Amino acid sequence: LTRRFEGHRDGVWHVTADAARNICASASADQTARIWSLNSGACLYTYVGHTGSVNCVAFAPQSESPSGEMTVATASGDESAHIWKVAIGSQAVLSSDDDDDDKGAAESGAGESDAAPPPSTAEGVRVKNTLMRLTGHTGVVIGCEWLA
């Protein structure tokens, strides 16, 4: 079975899948990471928090909470790694960085996990809020991985 996942505007450096959730994620030189539905091929979320190429993306093992929150890590050419969360199966995006009022980013609290699924747009829900920025690297960060 073959499926095309279209939407990145530059090369894709890394792809990872989570068969239990029927999703995959991609990291791209277009400075975004995307989470995709394996069933439909639709882009569910686009993370736009980096200012350099996103080189790697990783789902935290068993990170889904009862409310559907999932933790994701990304590594970037902007010399940082980011930790962020989304609510899979929901339009909610979870963040502790609420001081940014950009209207293009979806934000909500953990109690909104019963929201409708993300819209079927080319970008899905834009995520730009970061739970944690791991900075201080003196060069490109090319990989990220969770310890089980």
Image: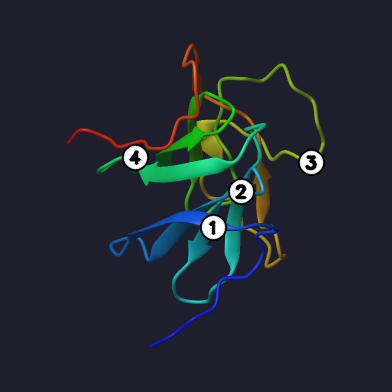
Q: Amino acid at mark 1?
A: Val
Q: Amino acid at mark 2?
A: Ala
The residue lying at 72 percent from left, 65 percent from top is 121
CA separation in Å, label 2 and label 3: 21 Å
Q: Is residue 5 left or right of residue 22?
A: right
Contact between labelled residues 3 and 2, with CB atoms less than 8 Å apart? no
Q: Which residue is mark 1?
A: 12
Q: Position of residue 22 (x, y in %)?
A: 38, 66
Q: Secondary structure at mark 1?
A: strand
Mark toward the start of the polypeptide (1 vs 2): 1
Please state which of residues 87 and 114 is positioned toward the viewer in this rendering. Answer: 87
Q: Which residue is mark 4?
A: 65
CA separation in Å, label 3 and label 1: 23 Å
For residue 25, above or below residue 78: below
CA separation in Å, label 1 and label 4: 29 Å
Q: Which residue is mark 3?
A: 104
Q: Residues within 10 Å of mark 1 (few under 14, many from 20)?
A: some
Please state which of residues 134 and 118 is positioned toward the viewer in this rendering. Answer: 134
- Quadrant where the image shows the C terminus: top left
Mark toward the start of the polypeptide (3 vs 4): 4
Q: Which residue is mark 2?
A: 29
Q: Secondary structure at mark 3?
A: loop
CA separation in Å, label 2 and label 4: 30 Å
